Amino acid sequence: MSDPSSINGGSVVAMVGKDCVAIGCDMRLGMQALTVSNDFPKIFQFNNAFLGLTGLATDVITLSEVFRYKVNLYNLREERKIEPETFANLVSSTLYEKRFGPYFVGPIVAGINSKSGDPYICGFDLIGCINFAKDFVVGGTSSDQLFGMCESLWEPNLEPDDLFETISQALLNAQDRDALSGWGAIVYVITKDKVVKRLLKTRQD
């Protein structure tokens, strides 16, 4: 339990479908084995990009505000909305700035490019190295379980409804096998013309 990234628990997963992308997280905020809250979402929207942040809760809150500030500045300076690919590079450079005293987070970015309509997902380590993916990205204390569930359930070119079902089953079954994740979940399904947010009820133990 000495790892700062696992003190508060939490998990995030993102998946690519056919012209759509989904990102989901659990709702638990813990202090090691003690659950403090079941209303701590870890996904934040920045224009066309969604950011999932697992890890130390103080750094999750701090970084979400830092990115809100930087994205607002980008919008004012560029006079356009930030795209997921650009936002991923912003996340990477922000984390790398603090490499000698890093934020203890595992970010995941997901979104749809507003011009091309291509889905985009990627993950990062705590100093900003980008992990590009064409299928799914996982993070948090149940990442081992999520890898297994996603490898089993994911398949290419899923429609939005099928993608929602796949990511939900992967997330719920993975967090059931991890004591530091769970207590509810939120899933966003993103297509070019809309974003659907669903709150999942899960075991409260």
Image (spheres, rainbow, N blue to C red):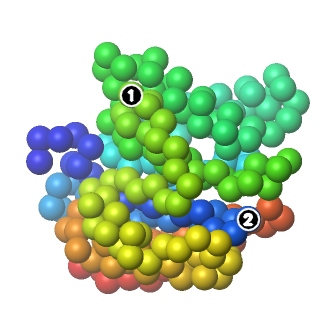
Q: Is residue 42 visible?
A: no
Closer-to-camera residue (137/155): 155
Whether 126 is drawn above or below 106: the answer is above
Q: Which residue is mark 1?
A: 127
Q: Residue furthest left?
A: 1
Q: CA distance from mark 1 to mark 2?
A: 30 Å
Closer-to-camera residue (64/120): 120
CA neighbours of label 1 inside 10 A, class few (<14), some (14 to 19), many (20+): many
User: What amino acid is labelled 1 in the image?
Assistant: Ile
User: What amino acid is labelled 2 in the image?
Assistant: Asp
Residue at 18%, 62% in the rendered image: 34
Residue at 50%, 78% in the rendered image: 166
Element carrying mark 1: loop
Whether 174 is drawn above or below 190: the answer is below
Residue 171: percent from left, percent from top:
40, 72
Q: Which residue is mark 2?
A: 19
Does label 1 or label 2 sit earlier along the sequence? Answer: 2
Q: Tell me if 77 is positioned left or right of 17 in this view.
A: right
